[in-house]
Image (spheres, rainbow, N blue to C red):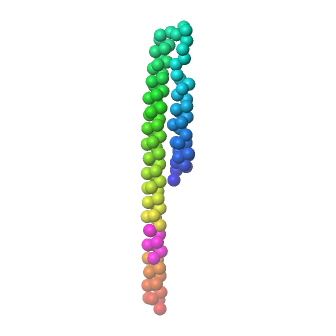
């Protein structure tokens, strides 16, 4: 398993709250000498931050689903490997028993 998967699992639950808490810092502040261009740019930035927040949440969900799918695939691969080892041990035992019968 890749070393970064556990790290992603730890970080994902905290990513959305951090982004959500950072969002209010970009809110409009009333000023008496507000330049219309600056106000428009601030509004555009706020919209971009909101869209980015939604995108980050969607990506976090997708990464979490991918991590779960990878874990399931790893579990399945381990089960198949364990079954293969068991079959190999049984076949070696049968081969050893047959060889001992031939030698006797």
Q: In the image, residue 15 lies at what x, y percent?
A: 53, 38
Task: Choose between 4 and 66: the one closer to the eye.
Answer: 66
Tell me, yes or no, whether the highlighted magenta stretch contains residue 94.
no
Q: In the image, residue 4 lies at what x, y percent?
A: 54, 46
The span shown in magenta is 83-90
Query: What residue is shown at x 47% (from left), y 32% (from top)?
Result: 53
The image quadrant of residue 77 is: bottom left
Q: In the image, residue 2 lies at what x, y percent?
A: 52, 50
Q: In the image, residue 104 lies at what x, y percent?
A: 47, 91
Task: Choose between 69 and 18: the one closer to the eye.
Answer: 18
Res. 4 in view: no
Query: What residue is shown at x 54% (from left), y 8% (from top)?
Result: 33
Res. 68 in view: yes
The image shows residue 50, relative to residue 79, as above or below, that is above
**Main SS class of the magenta portion in the image:** helix
Task: Choose between 88 and 104: the one closer to the eye.
Answer: 88
Query: What residue is shown at x 44% (from left), y 68% (from top)?
Result: 84
The image shows residue 28, relative to residue 61, as above or below, that is above
The image shows residue 10, relative to residue 29, as above or below, that is below
The image quadrant of residue 54 is: top left
Residue ranking furthest to the bottom = 104
Total residue callouts: 0
Query: What residue is shown at x 46% (from left), y 30% (from top)?
Result: 52
């Amino acid at each position: 398993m890749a070393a970064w998967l556990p790290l992603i699992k730890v970080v994902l639950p905290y990513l959305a709250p951090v982004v959500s808490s950072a969002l209010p810092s970009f809110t409009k502040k009333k000023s008496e000498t507000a330049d219309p261009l600056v106000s428009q740019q601030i509004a555009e930035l706020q919209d971009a931050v909101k869209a980015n927040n939604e995108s980050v949440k969607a990506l976090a969900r997708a990464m979490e689903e991918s991590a779960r799918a990878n874990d399931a695939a790893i579990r399945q691969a381990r089960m198949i490997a364990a079954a293969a080892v068991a079959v190999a041990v049984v076949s070696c035992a049968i081969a050893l028993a047959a060889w001992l019968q031939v030698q006797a």
